């Protein structure tokens, strides 16, 4: 099947490096970039800021908005890079309903490393105390999802190696990926 657009959903728990990797991928591929956190209603941000984990009911309308955004971009022939936790397979199924080819890039790593990174950053609404619930909710990519082209990458690698691995796996035409970092 020929797709008009590809959507790379950079997924994983809070603090796994989604924003860092998505920004670099978007820069190198020249694709539009969006942060799923910008689609959350104020009530979701308020909950998380208070250290209260989101539930399915908080996430469905938010995920639908993100799916709609991807479809709008695809209608204009625009490929995208998105950050989105996409913790459960059912959430990924909803996102995969967007027009275009939807691939997930799971930034996978251990609790200790992610916790250290969350504690090392400043000015973010997400408290490190929510990491255990994020990890408990996470459903790793299934063999079916991996066979369909989604990828799991180890966040112990430096960002430039993660980005290079994604671009190599995508097999994008040489003119779509630039050498700038
Ligand atoms: N591969 C990496 N190696 C070293 N440090 C990294 C790597 N990826 C991200 N970081 C650092 O880890 C911290 C968390 O990364 P980032 O904010 O991109 O995660 P996130 O998944 O977008 O978080 P959130 O979902 O909570 O917004 C940042 O300080 C970032 O600079
Ligand atoms: O599904 C969720 O619980 C949320 O999307 C969280 O993962 C955060 O919004 C994000 O990671 C920012 O820290």
Image (spheres, rainbow, N blue to C red):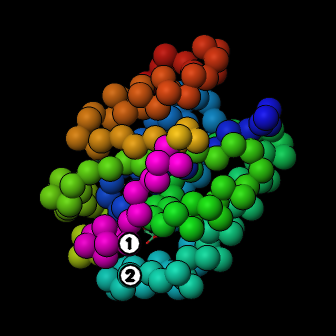
Q: Nearer the viewer, mark 1 or mark 2?
A: 1
Q: Residue at x 33, y 35 (%)?
A: 159
Was residue 112 drawn as part of the magenta stretch in this picture? no
Q: Position of residue 80 (x, y in %)?
A: 64, 43
- Residue occupied by mark 2: 53
**What residue range appears in magenta?**
131-146
Q: Check contact, mark 1 vs mark 2: CB within 8 A.
A: yes
Foreground residue among 88 and 48: 88
Query: Earlier along the polypeptide chain: callout 1 or callout 2?
Result: 2
- Residue occupied by mark 1: 137
Q: Residue at x 47, y 83 (%)?
A: 55
Q: CA distance from mark 1 to mark 2?
A: 10 Å
Q: Residues within 10 Å of mark 2 (few under 14, many from 20)?
A: some
Q: Is residue 67 left or right of residue 166?
A: right
Q: CB at mark 2 closer than 8 A to ligand 2?
A: yes
Q: Residue at x 43, y 85 (%)?
A: 47
């Amino acid at each position: 099947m020929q797709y008009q657009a590809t959507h790379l959903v950079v997924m994983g728990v809070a603090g796994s490096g989604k924003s860092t990797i998505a920004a670099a991928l978007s820069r190198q591929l020249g694709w539009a970039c969006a942060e799923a956190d910008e689609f959350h209603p104020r009530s979701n941000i308020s909950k998380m800021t208070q250290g209260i984990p989101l539930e399915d009911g908080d996430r469905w309308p938010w995920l639908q908005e993100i799916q709609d955004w991807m479809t709008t971009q695809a209608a204009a022939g625009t490929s995208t890079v998105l950050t989105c936790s996409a913790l459960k397979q059912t959430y990924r199924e909803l996102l995969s309903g967007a027009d275009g080819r939807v691939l997930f890039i799971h930034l996978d790593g251990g609790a200790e490393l992610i916790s250290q990174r969350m504690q090392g950053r400043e000015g973010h609404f997400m408290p490190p105390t929510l990491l255990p619930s994020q990890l408990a909710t996470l459903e790793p990519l299934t063999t079916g999802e991996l066979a369909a082209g989604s990828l799991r990458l180890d966040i112990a690698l430096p960002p430039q190696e993660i980005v290079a691995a994604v671009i190599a796996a995508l097999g994008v035409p040489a003119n779509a990926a630039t050498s700038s970092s």
